Image (tube, rainbow, N blue to C red):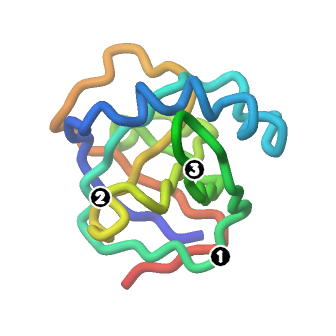
Amino acid sequence: MIIIEGTVIAGLGAAAQKLPELWPTIVRFIPAIQQCEQRTINIQLKHALHVKEPDLTIYVPWGLGSENISIIEIELEYPVSGPTQKAWIYYPHNSPHRRNPFIQEIVTSKIANLQPLVDCRLHLLRGAYVI
């Protein structure tokens, strides 16, 4: 297991608009993700992360276009030294975040009192490595 530290940051808002439309397809392939919120938490990592082998990459039609989405199961520790919970890196291939290996989008169940600029940790179970 690899643990990468990061900080919650504000996102672009695109996932909150796109995820509800993509959700049925994602849930069909990853039923356990159904209990999660249909939005992402953006994490600025302290070390770059390249997702080498995602658990799943799917081609998802939405709106007037389509997109490849890669997903990798992780555990999110929020805040640091707090509890961990099941989460997924949500990796849309057309996102501007894809060009920045220091930012990852995370899908997880609701976190009470989620705040920007709070430190957290990603626990990578497999299929990824730190640059």
Label 2 residue SS: helix
Residue in view at x 52 percent, y 70 percent: 2
Q: Which type of secondary structure does the marked residue at label 3 adopt?
A: strand
Residues under numbered marks 3 and 1 in contact, where contact means CB atoms less than 8 Å apart: no
Quarter holding the C terminus is bottom left
Q: Quarter of the image holding residue 26?
A: top right
- Give the residue pinned by disc 1: 53
> Looking at the rendering, which quadrant does residue 111 occupy?
top left
The residue wearing badge 2 is: 96
Tell me which label, 1 or 2, sits earlier in the chain. Answer: 1
Q: Considering the numbered disc 1 on the image, is that residue within a helix, a strand or a loop?
A: loop
Tell me the crowding category of disc 3: few under 14, some 14 to 19, or many 20 or more residues within 10 angstroms, Cα based.
few
Of callouts 3 and 1, the N-terminal one: 1
| Amino acid type, callout 3 | Ser
What residue do we see at 20% from left, 32% from top?
A: 116
Which quarter of the image is occupied by the N terminus? bottom right
126 versus 35 height, above or below:
below
Q: Residue at x 44, y 76 (%)?
A: 50
Measure the alpha-carbon separation of dots 1 and 2: 20 Å
Packing grade of label 2 (10 A; few <14, some 14-19, many >=20) is few
The Cα atoms of the two marked residues, 3 and 2, are separated by 16 Å
At which x and y percent is residue 53?
A: 65, 76
Q: CA distance from mark 3 to mark 1?
A: 21 Å
80, 94: nearer the viewer: 94
Please state which amino acid type lies under the numbered disc 1: Glu
**Rendered residue at 72%/63% (across/down):** 55
Mark 1: few/some/many CA within 10 Å (<14, 14-19, 20+) = some
